[in-house]
Structures are given as C-alpha cells and as structure tokens.
Image (cartoon, rainbow, N blue to C red):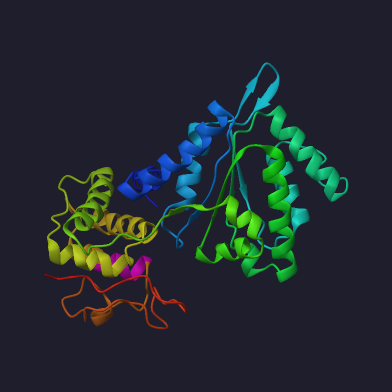
Amino acid sequence: MNTEVFEKIKAIRGITIKHPQFEKAVRKIERAFLSCSECSVPENLICIGPSGTGKSTLKNWFVDRYDRKDVNGCLNIPILAIDTPSHPTVKNFAEAVLIELGDPNYSRGSMQDKTNRIQLYLRQCEVKLIIFDELQHFVDQGTKSAQRSVSDWLKLLIDKSGVSTVLMGLERSERILQENEQIRRRFSHRVDLTPFSIDTHEDKKTFYGAIFVLDKSIALPKRIEVDDNLLISFFYATNGVMGYLVKLMLGAFEVAYFSRSKSISRKHLEVAFTDTIWSKGVGSNNPFSSSFAKRPLIREGMPFYLESQPFIKEPNDA
C-alpha cells in the first residue's frame, strides 16, 4: 500500500469524533472520576451499546487523558482499564486486573490472596476509577454459576476498593447485574451509546457532522457534497454505526486516491461499501447504487442482521 495512504488511514483511525452522545458519556464518566478523586465519594455506572458505537474509543480516551506515570518511584494509575478475558472466570478476571496493576506474581495465591493484592495495588497506585470492558464475555462464554460468581466478586471488589467503577459492554452485559440485586443497585446510573439516527433535523445534523469530520481529516482537495439523499444512503450503508462509517469512508478514500479524484463521490462510496462492508452489496443491495431498494439491510445474510430486535429504523424521507 502507498505509504501516504497508509499514514492517512492510520491517522483517521485515531480520530475521536465528539458527537453529542459521546460528549454526554464523557461528562458522566468524568463526574464519576472526579467524585472519587476530589471528594472520595465513588460513583458507579454501566455503559451499554452495540458493537462499533464507540465504547472502546470512550475507554481509550480516558486512559490516554489520565495516563499512568511514575511518581517518585511509585506507579500512579488514575484510571485502570481492564478487558474481560474472552473465556472468563473469576480467577482469570482477577489475574487480568493484577496484570494491569503491574503485579509480577499475578497467577500466584488463592482468590482471597489475589483480591487482597488488588486492593493493596489500587491504594498504592492511587486508582480513582476502574473501567471493565467487554463484560458480555461473561454472558457469551461464562456459565450461570460463573455469572453469579463474578457479580459477587465485583460487589466485594467495589465495596472494599472505594473507587468509582464503570462496566462496559453490549446490551446483554446487563444480565450480570440481574444475578445480584445488590450490585444492580450499585449500577443504577447508565450511559447509552447508540447508533446515529436521522429521524429529526438535529439527528441529521449530528450524523452529517460525523461524515464531515472524517471527510475533512481525509483532506482530499474537495469535500463531499452531502444532500439528504446521500445522507440516507450513508445511513443504510452503515446502520448508523460509527465503526462502519469509518470503514466506509476509509475505503472510499482509497478508491478516490488511486483513481486520482479530487473528492469522494457516490461511485467511490458504492465501490467501498462492497469492498469493506458487504461483498454481496451490489446493485439493489448497495445503498449508493441507483437501483438500491431502500430498505434496512437487517435480514439474515445481510451485514446488519440481528437475531434480536434490530435497532435500525426506517429513515424518514420527508
């Protein structure tokens, strides 16, 4: 791949688009962090959203802002971020926490020993907020007994640590809370990251804003001309999900760049949709094609198929 294209793609993938929903989530998590760090009053919340809506971006934004550092020979970790193991148990979950805290003996000792060491490290490293990401792994891979065990362990950890805690995951992550009424009460505050909508004028402005930021960052000589029809095509092509929007725009940029075009066109987007999102997305299955049958791509075999109730809604063309 051309070095210039590679560097451009790398830079665009690192962009954080602070749309209103993202900023609202930042404010809530920031409040939980400051409540602990400035007032010693921990706050807990759960952050829920479909894949690609920005949970990991949100987590990384906080980790980067409050980066760990060495203070007089001691490791200071204001915000500790933990990714739930793909096949989780309470044991390897606790070990994942110890690894992030820098414990060289993370696998040694009983569960009680590991929990005690976690508490000690949290105090020594002055942790003020813990983010547990990908919590749905306990639902997807863990047994019922594992779900009960982890909810009991989390309750114990949260109560004894005295730090604010954020649980992140897909919607089904909430099943962990259903296993324990006490922990459910502790996570009554909720942050939702949902796909973009184009139901209202304000929704359209927000979605257009995300497209504009990406297009501006791509920095071809001319900007995309996005009218309502093209905006609706973008919506069908991405299901309103930021992750798909980034993939689509990067794919369209590559097509435009190698065709020596000055801007991204509908034709470039049509090719990019097939290349980056759905290989069968051609003709009437491609939102940027003139023959596209306007319908959400949520049926079985389509890119946004969901077994549960789909979150995409028919856009209002009026």
Q: Residue at x 50, y 45 (%)?
A: 59
Residue situated furthest right in the rendering: 109
**Number of residue marks:** 0
Q: Residue at x 52, y 31 (%)?
A: 66
Query: For the magenta stretch, what is the residue range?
Result: 270-276
Q: Position of residue 45 (x, y in %)?
A: 53, 49
Residue situated furthest top in the rendering: 72
Q: Position of residue 143 (x, y in %)?
A: 72, 70
Foreground of the two, 296 or 301? 296
Q: Residue at x 79, y 44 (%)?
A: 115
Does residue 230 sit above or below 32 in this rendering? below
Q: Residue at x 82, y 47 (%)?
A: 107
Does residue 283 sit above or below 237 in this rendering? below
Q: Position of residue 2 (x, y in %)?
A: 36, 49
Q: Is residue 111 left or right of residue 313?
A: right
Does residue 277 sit above or below 54 in this rendering? below
Residue 143 is at least partly visible in this image: no
Q: Is residue 211 left or right of residue 95?
A: left
Magenta span: predominant SS is helix
Which quarter shows the C terminus? bottom left
Foreground of the two, 204 or 112? 112
Q: Is residue 275 magenta?
A: yes
Q: Is residue 54 left or right of residue 223?
A: right
Q: On the image, which quarter does residue 282 sit in? A: bottom left
Q: Position of residue 7 (x, y in %)?
A: 38, 43
